[in-house]
Amino acid sequence: MHKVKLNSEWTSGDYGDFLGLTDEERQIVEMRISVSKMIRRLREENGMTQTELAQRAGSSQSRIARIEAGAADVTLDLLIRVMLAAGGKLADLGDLLKEAYKPATGEYPSGTLLGKRRAFPSARKNLGGRKTRRAEPASAK
């Protein structure tokens, strides 16, 4: 928590308060920072330079530096591609996100992506209750 002067009064808050971010925007910022830190950790653990990682990911060294610095102009697609090139796995990303957004209660809301798994709704429910028929093969007509 930092103190920031707003409207001639000092107030405490974090970057999200200062920037007026919504909860969703805060989560996106936190996710990007977490993935950026993981990329740097993976690169260093695997003994790669930024240049070597850039070559593996099909990018440039300066872009890798921006990724590791948590630059906002880096796409999520590139973050994931670089993470995989650094030796990460999609399961690592899932674990990272699950840990980063664990609620204070220790449980995720039911039905959320990180919460308890639910069965997928039936196709009929997804189509508004309409029954569907499979198309008959052309030879059957």
Image (cartoon, rainbow, N blue to C red):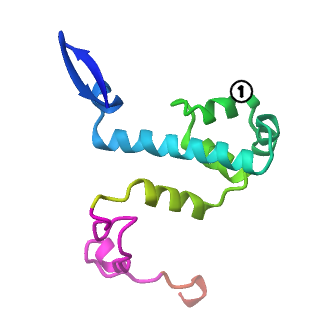
Magenta highlight: main SS: loop
Residue 111: x and y in percent read 31, 70
Residue 56 found in image quarter: top right
Residue 135: x and y in percent read 48, 81
Tell me the residue at 29%/42% (across/down): 23
Placement of the N terminus among the 4 image quadrants? top left
Tell me the residue at 69%/50% (across/down): 42
Amino acid at pointer 1? Ser
- Decide: is 106 above or below 39: below
Task: Say what secondary structure mark 1 lies in.
Answer: helix
Residue 58 found in image quarter: top right
Residue 6: x and y in percent read 22, 15
Instruction: State left or right for residue 29 relative to residue 129.
Output: right
Tell me the residue at 50%/42% (across/down): 32
Q: Which residues are magenta?
A: 105-134
Instruction: State left or right for residue 132 relative to residue 8.
Output: right
- Decide: is 90 above or below 130: above
Residue 51 found in image quarter: top right
Task: Say which residue label 1 marks.
Answer: 62
Residue 40: x and y in percent read 66, 42
- Decide: is 55 above or below 18: below
Residue 113 shown in magenta: yes
Instruction: Count residues near mark 1 (Cα–Cα under 10 Å), then give few for <14, some for 14-19, many for 20+.
Output: few
Count of numbered badges drawn on the protein: 1
Residue 130 shown in magenta: yes
- The foreground one among 53 and 111 is 53
